[in-house]
Amino acid sequence: MTPDEDNSAPPVTRHIISASRRTDIPSFYMPWFMNRVRAGVVRYPHPFTGQPLEVSLRHEHVHSIVFWTKNGAPLLEHVDELRDRGYAFVCHFTITGVPRQLEPGVPAWEEAVATFLALSRRLGPERVWWRYDPVLLTDAAGPDHYVSQFRAMAAALEGATGRCFFSFADFYGKVQRRLRVEQVTARDPALDEKQQLAQELGDMAAAHGMELLACCQDEVVGGSVGKGHCIEADELRRLFPEHSLKAAARPTRKQCGCSASRDIGVYDTCPHRCIYCYANQNTRRVEERHRSHDAGAETLVP
C-alpha cells in the first residue's frame, strides 16, 4: 500500500517535472537524466539568479514528467526503465519541417515523424503531443510553406496523437539579433493573416483527428483553434489518476495557462541551434557547456 492509498498517513505532495523548456534533455542529456532518476534527486540553478535549487525525483514525489524534445529517439531507449520505476510521463515532440537554416541541428522531419510514431506506439497517442511551433514567416518559409508542411505531417501523424500545439514566433530581442546575424529576413504577420493561417491549420488538424491548440496567443483562438495549456494539471490528472496532484496555475508569460512545475533544465545548453530559440543566447556558451557536460554529475552543467 502506498502513502496515497493509506488514509491514516498524510498525503504525499507530488510535483510535475518539466524536462525541459530550457533545453532538449531527451535529445542530448538523457543518460544524465536517468542517472538523476536513479539517484532520486536533481540539482539545477535558478534561471535568473543562479541560486542552486533541488527537487526530489523519487517516484513517490513525482506525479508526472513532461518531456520536451525535437528528437525522441534517445527517450525511446529508457521508456521501459521509467515505467518499471513507476514514473508517469508525457512528451511534447516538436516537428516543424522548416528550412535547415532555421533549425540547423534538428533531424529531418521524415525521420522525426518515424520516431514520433514509434514513441506513440509505446506510450499511446494520448501521451505524445505534436508541437508545430513556432511558425516563423521568412523569405524561404512563407504561409504556403507552412500549410504544405503541416498538411504532409498531419497526414503522417494521423492516429498517433490527438493534440497539436502551435504558436507564431515571438520576436524577443535576442531572437531579432540572431536573425540579423544569420541574415534571415523574417516578419511578424498582421493579426488577420495570423487568424486566417491558424484557422487553415486548425481545419487540417481536425481532418486528421487532432485539436490545434494555440499557446499564449489568445487572439487566434476560436473556430478550429483552441487555447493551449502545455503543462495542464487537469489533463495530467486525467491521464494519471492513480495519484493526487495539487498544482496551481503558474503562467510563465502573458496569456500562458500552464500549471506549476519544476523545470530542471538550464538555458544555453541546446545544440540544436534553432535561430528562433529563446533558450539559447550565446552559441559559444552552448558549445562549451555541452562539451563540459558530465552525465554522472548532479547538475546538467558545472
Image: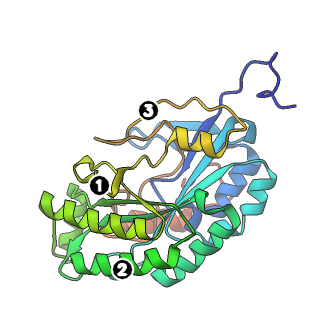
Question: Which is closer to the viewer, label 2 or label 1?
Answer: 1
Q: In the figure, residue 244 lies in which quadrant?
A: top right
Q: Would residue 299 be found to the left or right of residue 180 on screen?
A: right
Residues at marks 2 and 1, CA–CA distance in whole angstroms? 21 Å
Distance Cα–Cα, label 3 vs label 1: 25 Å
Residue 250 location, x and y as percent? 42, 34
Residue 251 location (% of width, % of height): 38, 38
* Point 46% across, 40% down: residue: 46
**Which of the pair 144/196 is nearer the observer?**
196
* Residue 115 drawn at (x, y percent): 59, 76
Residue drawn at (28%, 51%) of the image: 222
* Sequence-first tag of 3 and 1: 1
Please say if the residues under marks 3 and 1 sit with CB atoms less than 8 Å apart: no
Q: Closer to the camera, 20 or 149?
A: 149
Picture disc at residue 249: 3
Residue on which the image places disc 2 = 149
